Amino acid sequence: FYVDQPTVYHQLGLLPNDSSPAAIEKPAGEPELLISKGDDRETANLATVRGLLDAISKKNATAVAAVAAEEIKLVYHGEKQKIESKKAYMKWMKDTLASTDEGTITIKGAWAAGDVVAVLDLFTGIPKGNLDDRQIKTNVVQFFRITDGKIVKHEMFANRLNAAVQLGIVDPAELMETLAAAAKK
């Protein structure tokens, strides 16, 4: 179960957060049932996503751009920024790549079914400007939809609060006091 805690607190009215999306009015759609066939297409789709994640670890924006479709859409659950084109995706990606001095994505599991690839990974990195070289570790779940060898949809779930706590930006005890006070109002 993956959630972005700041988004949940924002949607419950407990914590102001201008970067988090509001609660949705209606579900995004019906769930999909995906069954893996283990065929060549799924193998190729897995290779595409593994290549993308390797390129991100190596900060190779050119390799990322090579697998991004012109109409790619990114949904980073917990952020309200809409990214709905290759140009916007690559701007977001370059900003993301520049946010760490070093970063590595370690794939813990990857599965393909038809045009969809699901990945569980661990991002480990040192954010830029971090004077004590404090490293963060964040579990991430990502879903990709591939069409003709290009990524057309990329969805990502990560707990942004976890990274803020690891960097010492947020004190969990103070946060709980703030949330408790807001809940009593």
Image (cartoon, grey):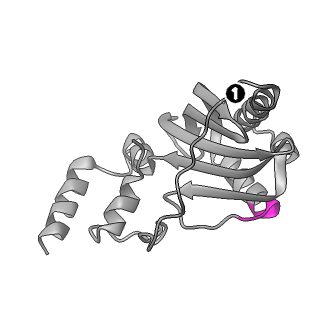
Q: Is residue 129 left or right of residue 181?
A: right
Viewer-closest of 22 and 44? 44
Figure quadrant of the N terminus: top left
Provide the residue span drawn in magenta. Answer: 84-88
Looking at the image, residue 88 lies above or below residue 141: below
Which secondary structure class fits the magenta region best? helix
Q: Quadrant of the C terminus?
A: bottom left
Residue 44 visible within the image: yes
Residue 134 shows in this picture: no
- x then y, percent, for residue 119: 60, 34
The vertical placement of 101 against 16, above or below, is above
Which of the pair 116/151 is nearer the observer?
Answer: 116
So how many labels did they put on this image? 1
The residue lying at 52 percent from left, 43 percent from top is: 130
Q: Secondary structure at mark 1?
A: loop
Percent coordinates x, y for residue 65 in the rendering: 84, 48
**Quadrant assignment, res 114:** top right
170 in the magenta segment: no
Residue occupied by mark 1: 37
